[in-house]
Image: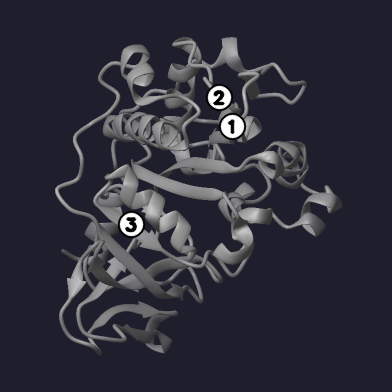
Amino acid sequence: MSLATDMNARASLTFELPAPDIGAWRAGNTGTEGVWHFDSGQPGRHVMVSALVHGNELCGAWALKGLLEAGVRPQQGTLTLALCNLEAFDRFDAADHDASRFTDEDLNRQWIDARMDAADTRERRRAAALRPWVARADWLLDIHSMHEPGAPLLLTGTQPRNLALAKAMAAPEHIVVDAGHKDGVRMRDYGRFGLPDAEGGDTRSLLVECGFHGDPASRAVAQDQCVRFLAQSGVVDADALARQLPGWRGPDAPRQWALEVTGPVVATSSAFRFTEPFTGLEVIPRAGTVIAWNGDGSDGVPVTTPYDDCVLVMPSVRQARAGVTVVRFARRRVL
């Protein structure tokens, strides 16, 4: 497949997942738009599930809408459900879905107190409004989807406590152990969530990538991850979730792989191009294999695999420009 053919195929991906009608749930019940909070009155964890951090990632909004419509309430502790970047979501157009990823800048890079305090973009102001809810949460599941078709991925950060939770959840098959992004901090790494195990106490935070933004299957993955996460948290037991949300939990993964990210590949320009139409999770057998060219024309620099059996994690040129991560290299092991 030529580069031009590959780019045309990617550009023409069909967006089949409709946007959910969240009008009934938009206001929230907390005074913070889009945020719902329920307190059992019993001791327990403060658990949060977030969606729409990016306005074109609809699967999590469908899952949160389903939780709210089913009347899911904590049996112990508290449960917070947050529809995050509503201004970006309001711009959603399936024909140009990338344009509604954010309004001014990526909300999932603004989780640094100085950036939120600056309040100089819409995403920073929204992060500041959400910050009290994220700061009080003990456990967080942040639901996302992908630019390109691919298998679901559960991102744990580098903390072993999160990897242990991913294993206990028993799905999806691929677990990504990574340190985040150089251009900002993700919600799942904010505050106590980013601390090492010795200091992080009972906190847990996961980010799930449910598949391509427009694939209806991404909604099923989001639903499955919600019930697994909530059951593990203890705020709602598995039997209650099965009664209220029949069909949400899918089969366990036949096995789970830990993909330990060793480093990102960052584009130097929008001319970054792969040598093949990689879709993710390819295992490249030999170190030194050229998998991409970084830069313009004859000045492009070859991008090579750093070790044998190198796994490509989330390759995508859809957002390629200087400073953007376009793929990650990882080693894998059975979890």
Q: Amino acid at mark 2?
A: Gln
In the rendered image, which quarter contains the C terminus?
bottom left
Q: Is residue 176 above or below residue 80?
A: below
Q: Residue at x 29, y 36 (%)?
A: 14
241 relative to 199, above or below: above
Question: Which numbered circle lies on residue 175?
Answer: 3
Give the class, few, some or many, for how many residues have Cα within 10 Å of label 2's Cα (few <14, many ≥20). some
Q: What residue lies at 59% left-to-right and 65% top-to-bottom?
A: 198
Q: Position of residue 101 (x, y in %)?
A: 54, 43
**What amino acid does circle 1 point to?**
Gly
Q: Nearer the viewer, residue 16 or 248?
A: 248
Residue toward you, 224 or 41 = 41
Label 1 Cα neighbours within 10 Å, binned few <14 / some 14-19 / many ≥20: some
In the structure shown, which secondary structural element does the residue marked by tag 3 occupy?
strand
Whether residue 280 is visible to the viewer of this picture, yes or no, is no
Density class for disc 3 (Cα within 10 Å; few <14, some 14-19, many ≥20) is many
Q: Is the C-beta separation of discs 3 and 2 under 8 Å?
A: no
Real-space CA distance between mark 2 and mark 1, rounded to the nearest whole angstrom? 5 Å
User: Residue at coordinates 62% horizontally, 22% vertically from top-left?
Assistant: 42
The residue labelled by disc 1 is 44
Residue type at mark 3? Ile
Is residue 236 at least partly visible in the picture?
yes
309 vs 317, left or right, is: left
Distance from the alpha carbon under mark 3 to that under mark 2: 28 Å
Residue 170, which numbered label?
none
Judge from the rendering whether residue 126 lies leftward or rightward of residue 85; answer left or right: right
**Label whose residue precedes the other's in the sequence (2 or 1):** 1
Q: Which residue is mark 2?
A: 76
Q: Quadrant of residue 265?
A: bottom left
Q: Mark 2 and mark 1 in contact? Answer it, CB < 8 Å.
A: yes
Q: Looking at this view, is 52 or 180 the one in front?
A: 180
As drawn, 71 above or below 197? above
